[in-house]
Image: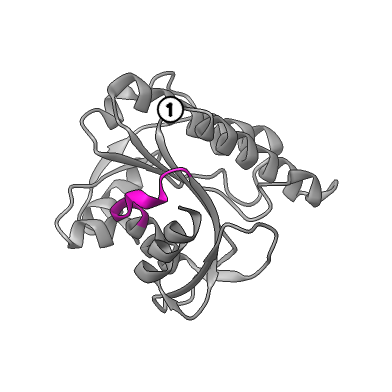
Amino acid sequence: YLTRMLAGRGDRVRGIVRNPDHAADVEADGGEPVVLDMEAAADLSDAVRGADAIVFAAGAGPGSGAERKKTVDFGAAVKLVEAAQATGVRRYVIVSSIGAHDPSSAGDGPMGPYLEAKHDADERLMSSALDWTVVRPGGLTDDPGTGKVDVSTEMGRRKSIPREDVAAILAACLDAPETIGLAFEAFEGDQDVELAVRALARTES
């Protein structure tokens, strides 16, 4: 969704994919595919060189073990932080998860390793000198986006949100330097995406 939105408004978008079979999907959305295994590669600098911003939205996915969550949800995110620092890309927006502020809330369940990986990736990014924003969406659905959301820097709520609306939030963050240095949760709601994101920035300033 994000590639389609950004390319549709005239931005040049590179999309990193591990599976070459997915390159056509990136092209169909108007992006330039970069086939790269972020788990295996030691240095991701070439993939981000010359970019104005990085959005990390990768994940090991459901069904993956704790080790893959460490190497993808944490490891790949950190490699991109290092690549940004090495190439001078200042802006970095990361897709995290609700609950990542307190991974212990998952107990011994399967979500524990996932939230720990997300938490550690967020902390690594937030401790960097990059212009970061951490977006923690609720449960992701494939419902059509509504363009209406509920965002807050207060952590701990639970609700769902369409993936398409998460993409709209990410695009809005790239347009709103006021969101630099903010971590916030995002759910379906009743406020226009851009207004919600900018209002969020104002409440924190």
For image coordinates 63% across by 59% down, the residue present is 154
State yes or no: residue 70 in magenta: no
For image coordinates 35% across by 28% down, the residue present is 84
Residue 94: image location, x then y, percent: 46, 45
Res. 120 image quadrant? top right
Secondary structure found at label 1: loop
State yes or no: residue 178 in magenta: yes
Residue 92 is at least partly visible in this image: yes
Which corner quadrant holds the N terminus? Answer: bottom left
- Viewer-proximal residue, 126 or 79? 126
Give the residues drawn in magenta, as a range: 173-181
34 relative to 142 in the view: left or right: left
Residue 123: image location, x then y, percent: 59, 34
- Viewer-proximal residue, 191 or 24? 191
Res. 65 image quadrant? top right
Q: Which residue sits furthest right?
A: 108
16 relative to 63 in the view: left or right: left
Establish if 161 lies above or below 2: below
Establish if 126 lies above or below 106: above
Q: Main secondary structure of the magenta part?
A: helix
Residue 15: image location, x then y, percent: 30, 44
Residue 80: image location, x then y, percent: 42, 30
- Near mark 1 (Cα within 10 A), the count class, few <14, some 14-19 or many ≥20, is few
For image coordinates 58% across by 30% down, the residue present is 71
- Viewer-proximal residue, 135 or 79? 135
- Viewer-proximal residue, 88 or 41? 88
Residue 141 is at least partly visible in this image: no
Which residue is labeled 1 in the image? 129
Residue type of the residue flagged with mark 1: Ala
